[in-house]
Every structure is written in C-alpha cells, then in structure tokens.
Image (cartoon, coloured by chain):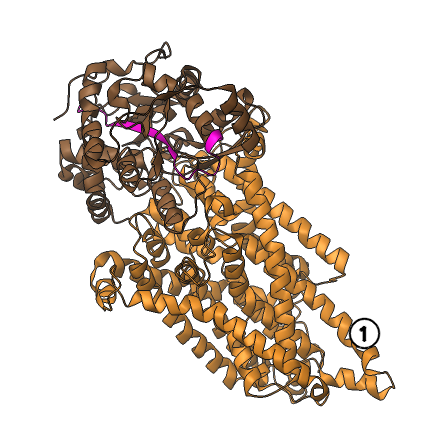
C-alpha cells in the first residue's frame, strides 16, 4: 500500500537547517544504506542465484523452462492473474463510491464507516477466509443453511460455494478493498475546496465540477489503488492457502509454498518467485508514472477543506448500503467466528444448550504451543514495530531534511521491499540465512528481519509524510516569532512527529501480527507465531480452536494498540491513513 | 494383493518388509540394544530437564491429552506438542536438521517410511523401552531398536448419518465412483498427511491409479490432514469421506456425533505410526521417559480408550463395542515401497487431482 509520495519526497526540499547536522548524518546515512543493502540485497541475491541453478548447483535455465511449460506451474500462474485482475476491478467498483461517500458526502456516521473499513483491514486474510468457510461452505455454511431454511431448497443446493475460484476472489476482495478505499478517500479529501469553489463561482454545474475538477484529481489515486489491489491479490498467500486446496487449484503463492514439501525444491521456488517480483516492480513503476504525472493533485496542507455534497433523502439509504457492504468483510465473518468459538458445533447457530467454553479451555490450557506462539508473536510485533518505526524515523529525517544522491539511494532502498511479496521474501531469507555468513534460521531474528523488511516501506512513507506535514514553513514561522530551534522542535515538530511515530509503530505491529506468507516459510517449532499456529490448526480442520485463537489474537492486538496510544499519546494515530 | 483378514500373524508378515528394509539399510547396527527400564535416576534427570518436545502427526486433541496425561504422571516435565501432518513433520525435521537445528526430542509419524529415511540418515537414537522388548511383537520393533510401532489405525470410508441412510451408504471404494456421490465426497491429501500417503500407495497398488482418475471426476473436496475428513462429515459439510482416520470417527461416534464408519470391501489401508527418539534430542532424559511412558501399557491403553487407535502392545485390550482389528479386512502395508515411491506418488496424485 501507501506508495504515493516516495518520488516526491525523494525530490525533497533543501532545508537550510540541515547543514549543521550534515556532518553527523553522513555516517548515519552510510550505516543505514549498508544495513538496508544487506537486508534486501542478500535475500534477493540468493533468490536470483537459486533461480538459475539446478539441484547440484550448476548454472541452468531449466527452472524457467519448467515454469513456462509444465502445466502444474502455468495453470497456477494463469489462475493468479485471473484472481488479481478480478479483485482489482471489483475492489475499484466497490471502494471508490464508498470512499466518495465517506470523504465527500454528508452521509451520517461517516467516521464509523471509516473505522469499520479499518477493522476489515486489520483482519488477517487467512482468518477472513476461514470465517467465510464457516459462512459459505456449500453444505455446512451458516448462510447456506439459512437460505435452505427460508426457501425450503433441497439439501444438495447451495446459494454460495466458497470453495470455488469465484469464492476465493470474493474473499480476497473483502480484505483488499480497504487499500483502494484509503487511497481514494484520502485523495478526495485532499482535493482543494477552493478549486471547486472557483469552478462553482464561474458558473459550473455541480456535475461539471465533479467531472472537470474532482474526478480528474482523484483518478490517479483510483488507478494507483487498482494497481495496489492487483499486487496485493497477486502476492496474497493466506486466503488461497485456506480456500484453493479444497477448491482443487493452486495459485502461484500456494504453489511456491508446496515446493517446500519434501523433498524441498528451493531452486524451483526461487524461479517461481521471480515472475511475482518482476511484475511487482513493473506495476509499481507504472503506478509512480501515473502518479508522478499527476502529482499536482497533492497540493499540501493548505487550501480550503473540500465541500461536502448534500445527499438529501439519500443520506440514510447510502449509509445502509455501506453497512450492508461492510457485513461482508466484517460483521458476518466476525459473527461466524464468535459463533464457532462458543458453540459445540461450529456449523450450528449458538443456542443456550449449545454454548460451551470447552474451545477456550482447549486452546489455552491444552494446546501446548499456544503460549509460545503468543509470546513469540507479541515479542516480534513489539520489536519489529519499534525497530521499524525508529529506522523509518531516521531514514525519513535524512531524506526529507537533506538532499543529495546518497539520500536518494537511501530512500529508494527503504522503498524497495515493497516490490518483494512476502512469500518471495520468505524464500529469499530462507536461502540467505540458512547458510554462512549469517545462520539465522531457527531463531526469532530471521523472522524479525523479515518483518522489518516487509513493513519498512509503509513505515518509511508514514514517517516521511509526517516530516512533510511539518513543513519547514511551520518551523520557520516558529523561528520568526522568536522561538529557538530547540523550542520549535519541542513545541512544533516534536508533538506532530510523536503521533505519527506511534501511528507507525501501531501500523507495523498490526501488520506483523497478521503476517503469514513469510512466517510460514521461516518458522521452526520453537519460533512458531500465531498466524502459523492457526494455519496448522486449519490443516486438521480444528475450526473452533481457530476461532478462539483468531479472536483472542485480534482482541490482544487491539489492547496493545489502545495501550500504545494512551501511554504514548498517539491521539488519532491508529487511524488508517495513507498520508 | 490384499489379504482377507488381519490376524496378529498376518500383521507379522505384513510388517516384515519394514524389518527387512530397515535391516538392509543399516549395516552399522548389529545387536538390539538392551531394554531400558524407567529408573528413579531417569525420572530425576528428566525432571531436571523439565521439558520435552514431541513432534507428532496424531490428531491434536489426542496428542495434547497424551501430553497432559504424561505431565500428570511426571509432574515438572512439560511436553510441548508440535503437531502437523506426517509429511509436514518429515519436511520440518528435514528443513531443521539441514540447518543443524535440533529442536525435537521424540518423533511420531503417520508414515512409517519416514523412519526408514531417518534411520538411514543416522539421526535416531537406539532406545528400547522395557515394554517394547517384553510386549511388542517383533514386526512392530525395529531390529536395531531405533523405533517401534506406537499406534496402528486404518484409513476408512465414512459417512454422515443425517445425510446418508445406512442402506444407501457406500460399501466399497468402487461404490464411491457412483455418480450419486459427485460433489459429496471429501478426501485428504498425501502431500500433507502420512496416513493418506500410506493409504494412497496401498490403494494405487491394489486398485490401480485408474481408480483415483475416476475418483477425481467426482468433484471431491480436497483437504489436507487425514483428521479433517471426519470433521467435515461431523460438520455436515460433505456426506461421505473417501479416506481419513478411523480413530477420529471412533471418537466421534462414541460421543454421539452423526458419523458412521465403513470398512471397504476391498480392504482398508493399514497405517502404522512408529515413534522414535532423536540422537541429538535437546532433552535426552525427558525424551527417554516420554518414550517409555508412551509405549507403556498405561500409555497405550489410554491411546486406545481415548484416542480410538489400535495398539501393538500384547497386554492392551481393545475397547468393548469397537470392531476388533483382526475382524477387519485390511490392505497390506509396505513402508519400504512407500519410501521408494513417495515422490512419484505425490507427483502422480498432483497430476490427477490438480493440487
């Protein structure tokens, strides 16, 4: 996600205050550049090496030949593109109107809608997929049972079948549309009101204003959102891993994962990862080309707030439509999970005599891996969030308060992991850190490296836009009014950055807790995390235990976020915002 | 190839290949190690270690119940269960040992072929619990004392009794090819489950791969672990399972859930799940104690009574009301052949079922 501003920031402003710190920042910059090189170049380097060699270590192109000719590879690739394309279009169709309603209309409870979208973003895609199994498995799914009960349809008929390509596309949409939503909503909010006012004053109709001003300014964000949705769907592992096998097909990510089955074929896995990597790079280039050309859309913090459009009698129906749509990623799945957690049979609706706490007892006092996985997950979450936020802070400081070639490289490196899908990075890290000089496989460090690398781009972007939002004119204003530089830092820059830092911390924390695709390649029994534990429970179909563990994981995550915000004073920090 | 009935003697013959293959594959071990008793010294040393890590393919609730029973018997030793399908356990140990990560103390798989590989790799420690020496028939003991049959069960057909009337239920694997079952069958996957790996080998040998080709046309629902098809039946998600654990169905039936077992007329694939101890076990004494307890009469009886599994221990009794193993027609197991053909079986299966 959140890839918009990198190029603009790299073009960054030259700030006079930087000169005094430049001496100090050069060694820091060199250090960070070197660290990022190791972090990114090492795994990707090994990935390349393995992709071009055979089991015996000889150079070969056979892996790619197999990839392009063997139907067991070609079909997953085609399936993946079908999924990604459909998801991207469907997300655009749903998220863009919803984003407009939230950002630009006077629909009631707009903020509540935004928060619920955030809840769907926080939901791990694998957990959402499992919840949708509970809802829409053709026979035992709660929705299908309800449908049969209402219509009296025979037991063989089902309204929904989640174990199909369409079912998978639907579930992926549920947890991908927030990316489009956030990008478009933020863009719409940033459309300067004075431009629209000017158009209105010059006699333009409301529709003409929308067509000539608002839509053109928001369009790049929509296109960017579609690309991000495509990328997310293409590289997603969690949902396909749950739904593709019962449906009888592979996507490229589940195929890569299956190549680690005994005997492991890391060469083929590396080769199969490369198309994902290349395509991601290409699409990101396309995205920045689209946005780069239209960068005038982002005008900065000044200007009048955009006018809200009155919906009149449609206000409440609009809200009802939004809430109905949000049933799909949030209300229904969470309802199904709660039902499964407390019910004796996960596929039956909870009643008093079906109520049980047995599943909780099982998960927390009998499953011996629970405690370890919880500890690992939250430890890694906190460590990755802290390290990631601090690294992002330093890098963003260097790139936005100083200019030059070195800083450009640093900014590029910080953004580079965004082009590396989780499972590809997992394969790369596995290849890199199971051999000298750094043998880290089997320790929490390898997972920490993976998490930091995966989340660095988003963290960096958040911090960078934080530095942007504290534009030097604010600092200069403080200086003009006689404040010392320290006072400005303390009273102006500091408070504004602190809330962004907490927001970044929370963002990375949430992302780490829900990460599965790299962890599933990198874990060992001692370094198991919750997402992998849930994934293992799925293997043997322990749905009730999954529901308990998944809900506990989300509740604990929420508590950590609340605690972080109240202790560190994040304010509105945990809100999902792109910039 | 299949045998009409299974007796203790035919089990001996049936598992002889296991003995033969393992004997051939390990020239270095000549004599069976002396049986080991549980001594106060062992208990003290194990308690000092305080923990044991057990990788197992047995269904999680059974595994955790076994672990808790052991912890109750030997307070102060916590057992951590690492449960996944047999094939994933095998993958996990391979991946970890390749990086010199020695995390596992005791290992149990649902694919006996894995022990042939591990023995050849020399990563198992010879250790013969006293009960194994005294009460286990030779065909269920590795001649070099590196592993023994910890549990025995079958892969069976099953159905949901709310969805299928007994008289309409399938009686044989051949019956599952009837078009009336299209879209109603669930089955597990040999790439994840050792049980299904073993069963797929036996069925492909006795019924031919053509059988699977026809079965694949029935729009089956593919799941991973052999513990999952019984659960999908109980949920009511599918009416019939083409393969999966007999022991899950036994447990569910006795709890009153709407499932029924069918022992196919062609013979049910026979699965033997050995256990062994790792040479580089991080908690060697706790590992030995855990091994000894799991092979003891108590441990085995618990496994049978609670888990619905079968035991090779001579003193362990089958639970009344269950069909005794010797009255069931089974296929013949052959771990050496599974070991030789494992990759081919997985690849062939993936070609037929597309996953």
Q: Which residue is mark 1?
A: A490
Q: Is residue B87 left or right of residue B47?
A: left
**Front-lying residue, A106 or A18:** A18
Question: Which residue is more in the foreground, A35 or A166?
Answer: A35
Find out whether residue A139 is within the magenta segment.
no
Of the 4 image quadrants, the one containing the N terminus of chain B is top left
> Vertical placement of A356 versus A550: above or below?
above
Protein chain holding label 1: A
Q: Colour of chain A?
A: orange
Q: Position of residue A19 (x, y in %)?
A: 70, 89
Position of B195 relative to A126 (above/below) = above
Which residue is pictured at 25% across the width and 49% down the height?
A: B354
What residue lies at 54% left-to-right and 33% top-to-bottom?
B49
Q: Residues within 10 Å of mark 1 (few under 14, many from 20)?
A: few
Q: Which residues are magenta?
A: B265-286
Residue A118 placement (x, y as % from top left) = 60, 58
Q: Where residue B20 appears, x then y in whole percent? A: 18, 29
Colour chosen for chain B: brown
């Amino acid at each position: 996600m959140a890839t918009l501003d990198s190029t603009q920031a790299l073009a960054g402003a030259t700030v006079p205050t930087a000169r005094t710190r430049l001496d100090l920042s050069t060694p820091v910059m060199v250090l960070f550049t070197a660290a990022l090189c190791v972090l990114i170049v090492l795994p990707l380097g090994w990935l390349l090496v393995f992709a071009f060699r055979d089991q015996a270590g000889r150079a070969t192109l056979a892996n790619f030949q197999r990839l392009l000719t063997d139907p067991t590879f070609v079909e997953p690739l085609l399936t993946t593109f079908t999924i990604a394309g459909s998801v991207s279009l469907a997300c655009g169709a749903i998220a863009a109107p919803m984003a407009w309603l939230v950002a630009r209309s006077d629909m009631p409870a707009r903020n509540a809608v935004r928060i619920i979208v955030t809840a769907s973003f926080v939901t791990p895609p694998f957990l959402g997929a499992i919840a949708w199994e509970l809802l829409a498995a053709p026979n035992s799914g709660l929705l299908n049972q309800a449908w049969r009960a209402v219509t009296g349809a025979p037991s063989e008929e089902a309204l929904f079948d989640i174990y199909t390509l369409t079912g998978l596309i639907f579930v992926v949409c549920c947890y991908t549309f927030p990316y489009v939503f956030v990008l478009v909503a933020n863009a719409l909010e940033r459309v300067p009101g004075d431009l629209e006012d000017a158009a209105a004053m010059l006699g333009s109709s409301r529709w003409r204003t929308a067509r000539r001003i608002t839509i053109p300014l928001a369009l790049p964000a929509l296109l960017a959102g579609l690309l991000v949705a495509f990328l997310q769907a293409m590289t997603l592992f969690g949902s396909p891993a749950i739904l593709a096998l019962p449906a009888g097909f592979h996507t490229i990510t589940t195929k890569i994962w299956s190549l680690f089955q005994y005997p492991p074929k890391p060469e083929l896995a590396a080769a199969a990862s490369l198309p994902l990597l290349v395509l991601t790079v290409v699409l990101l280039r396309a995205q920045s080309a689209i946005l780069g050309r239209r960068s005038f859309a982002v005008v900065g913090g000044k200007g009048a707030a955009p006018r809200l459009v009155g919906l009149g009698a449609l206000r409440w129906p609009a809200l009802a439509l939004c809430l109905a749509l949000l049933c799909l990623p949030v209300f229904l799945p969470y309802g199904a999970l709660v039902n499964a957690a407390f019910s004796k049979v996960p596929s039956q609706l909870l009643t008093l005599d079906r109520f049980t706490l047995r599943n909780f007892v099982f998960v927390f006092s009998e499953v011996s891996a629970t405690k370890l996985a919880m500890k690992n997950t939250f430890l890694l979450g906190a460590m990755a969030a802290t390290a990631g936020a601090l690294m992002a802070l330093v890098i963003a400081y260097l790139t936005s308060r100083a200019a030059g070639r070195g800083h450009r490289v640093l900014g590029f490196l910080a953004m580079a992991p965004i082009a590396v899908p989780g499972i590809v990075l997992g394969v790369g890290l596995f290849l890199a850190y199971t051999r000298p000089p750094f043998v880290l496989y089997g320790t929490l460090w390898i997972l920490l490296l993976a998490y930091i690398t995966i989340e660095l781009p988003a963290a960096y972007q958040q911090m960078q836009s934080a530095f942007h939002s504290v534009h030097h004119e604010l600092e200069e204003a403080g200086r003009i009014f006689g404040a010392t530089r320290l006072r400005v830092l303390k009273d102006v820059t500091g408070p504004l950055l602190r809330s962004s830092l907490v927001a970044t911390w929370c963002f990375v924390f949430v992302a780490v807790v829900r990460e599965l695709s790299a962890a599933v390649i990198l874990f060992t029994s001692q370094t198991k995390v919750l997402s992998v534990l849930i994934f293992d429970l799925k293997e043997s179909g322990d749905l009730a235990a999954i529901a308990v563990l998944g809900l506990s994981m989300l509740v604990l995550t929420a508590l950590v976020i609340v605690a972080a915000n109240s202790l560190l004073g994040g304010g509105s920090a945990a809100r999902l915002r792109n910039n | 190839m299949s045998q009409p009935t299974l007796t203790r003697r035919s089990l001996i013959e049936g598992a002889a290949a296991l003995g033969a293959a393992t004997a051939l594959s390990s020239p270095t071990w000549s004599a069976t190690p002396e049986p080991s008793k549980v001594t106060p010294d062992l208990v003290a040393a194990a308690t000092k270690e305080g923990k044991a890590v057990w990788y197992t393919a047995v269904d999680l609730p059974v595994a955790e119940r076994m672990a808790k029973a052991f912890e109750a018997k030997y307070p102060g030793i916590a057992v951590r269960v690492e449960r996944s399908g047999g094939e994933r356990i095998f993958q996990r140990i391979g991946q970890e040992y390749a990086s010199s990560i020695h995390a596992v103390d005791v290992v149990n798989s649902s694919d006996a072929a894995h022990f042939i590989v591990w023995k050849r790799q020399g990563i198992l420690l010879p250790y013969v619990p006293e009960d194994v020496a005294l009460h286990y028939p030779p065909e269920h003991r590795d001649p070099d004392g590196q592993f023994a049959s910890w549990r025995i069960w079958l892969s069976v057909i099953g159905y949901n009794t709310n969805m299928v009337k007994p008289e309409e239920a399938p009686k044989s694997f051949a019956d599952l090819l009837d078009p009336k079952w299209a879209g109603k069958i669930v089955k597990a996957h040999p790439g994840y489950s050792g049980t299904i790996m073993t069963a797929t080998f036996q069925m492909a040998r006795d019924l031919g791969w053509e059988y699977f080709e026809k079965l694949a046309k029935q729009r089956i629902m593919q799941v991973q672990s052999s513990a999952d098809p019984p659960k999908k039946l109980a949920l009511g998600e599918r009416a019939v399972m083409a393969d999966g654990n007999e022991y899950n169905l036994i447990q569910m039936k006795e709890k009153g859930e709407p499932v029924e077992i069918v022992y196919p007329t062609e013979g049910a694939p026979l699965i033997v799940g050995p256990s062994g101890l790792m040479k580089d076990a991080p908690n060697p004494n706790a590992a030995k104690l855990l091994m000894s307890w799991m092979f003891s009469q108590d441990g085995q009886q618990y496994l049978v009574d609670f888990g619905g599994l079968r035991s090779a221990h001579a003193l362990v009794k089958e639970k009344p009301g269950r069909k005794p193993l010797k009255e069931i027609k089974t296929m013949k197991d052959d771990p050496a052949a599974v070991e030789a053909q494992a990759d081919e079986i997985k690849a062939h299966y993936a070609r037929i079922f597309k996953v």
